[in-house]
């Protein structure tokens, strides 16, 4: 069973995450940031994995620390759940439309953290959150998970672009971490991730 519990406590935040790659059940997500909760729920639901997240942060300052640290802890949880990669598919992609918007996520869960993010949001805030924090969330997640991700958004409505992005990432990471035909094989020509 690939179930992981991770915690991070700093002077700025307290994050508790439970991630289960093999259980497609809905978990409780409560970060104190309603739009971010909605995005994390969409990611896990469409990705077909269990995610429970409790985050308390210095929201009186702004949402940056809470969202960044959630990305860090979620990335650490994915890395631990993937472990040596034995049996996973490793590569996956998703292209998700939402009305006039579209998002693409192409992932490699091969142990090398990297993010390429293309596209912009028109408004300074999306769902009440500063627009630049979404890229930073995925950067924090990917670096700590050892995932290479190429994420692209396009469209007119910022809410639709953001939601399509979280869904695309969820579907791609759910597919990449699924067990393949040979559950004993590490998906690498090197024999290790």
Image (cartoon, helix red, strand yellow):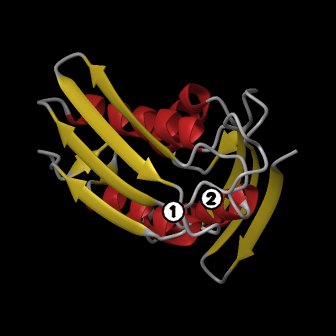
* Residue 40 screen position, x and y as percent: 54, 41
Q: Quadrant of residue 179?
A: top right
Q: Going 60% across and 35% down the picture, which residue do you hit?
A: 44
Q: Quadrant of residue 144?
A: bottom right
Which comes sooner in the sequence, label 2 or label 1? 2
Q: Going 18% across and 30% down the picture, which residue do you hit?
A: 157
Residue at the spot of label 2: 74
Classify mark 1: helix, strand or loop: helix
In the picture, measured across the screen, residue 153 lies left or right of residue 65, that is: left
- Circle 2 packing at 10 Å, graded few (<14), some (14-19), many (20+), is many
- Circle 1 packing at 10 Å, graded few (<14), some (14-19), many (20+), is many
Are the residues at dot 2 and dot 1 in contact (C-beta closer than 8 Å)? yes
In the picture, measured across the screen, residue 69 lies left or right of residue 8, that is: left
In the picture, measured across the screen, residue 4 lies left or right of residue 74, that is: right
* Residue 17 screen position, x and y as percent: 73, 55
* Residue 79 screen position, x and y as percent: 66, 63
């Amino acid at each position: 069973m690939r179930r992981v519990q991770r915690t991070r406590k700093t002077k700025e935040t307290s994050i508790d995450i439970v991630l289960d790659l093999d259980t497609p059940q809905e978990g409780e997500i409560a970060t104190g940031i309603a739009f971010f909760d909605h995005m994390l729920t969409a990611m896990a639901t469409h990705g077909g994995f269990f995610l429970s997240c409790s985050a308390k942060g210095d929201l009186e300052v702004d949402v940056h620390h809470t969202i960044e640290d959630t990305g860090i802890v979620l990335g650490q949880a994915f890395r631990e759940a993937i472990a040596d990669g034995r049996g996973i598919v490793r590569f996956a992609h998703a292209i998700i439309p939402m009305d006039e918007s579209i998002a693409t996520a192409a992932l490699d869960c091969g142990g090398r953290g990297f993010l390429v993010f293309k596209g912009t949001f028109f408004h300074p805030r999306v769902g009440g959150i500063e627009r630049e924090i979404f890229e930073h969330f995925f950067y924090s997640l990917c670096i700590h998970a050892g995932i290479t991700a190429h994420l692209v958004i396009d469209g007119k409505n910022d809410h639709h672009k953001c939601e399509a992005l979280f869904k695309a990432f969820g579907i791609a990471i759910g597919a990449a971490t699924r067990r393949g035909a040979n559950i004993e094989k590490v998906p690498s020509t090197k024999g290790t991730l």
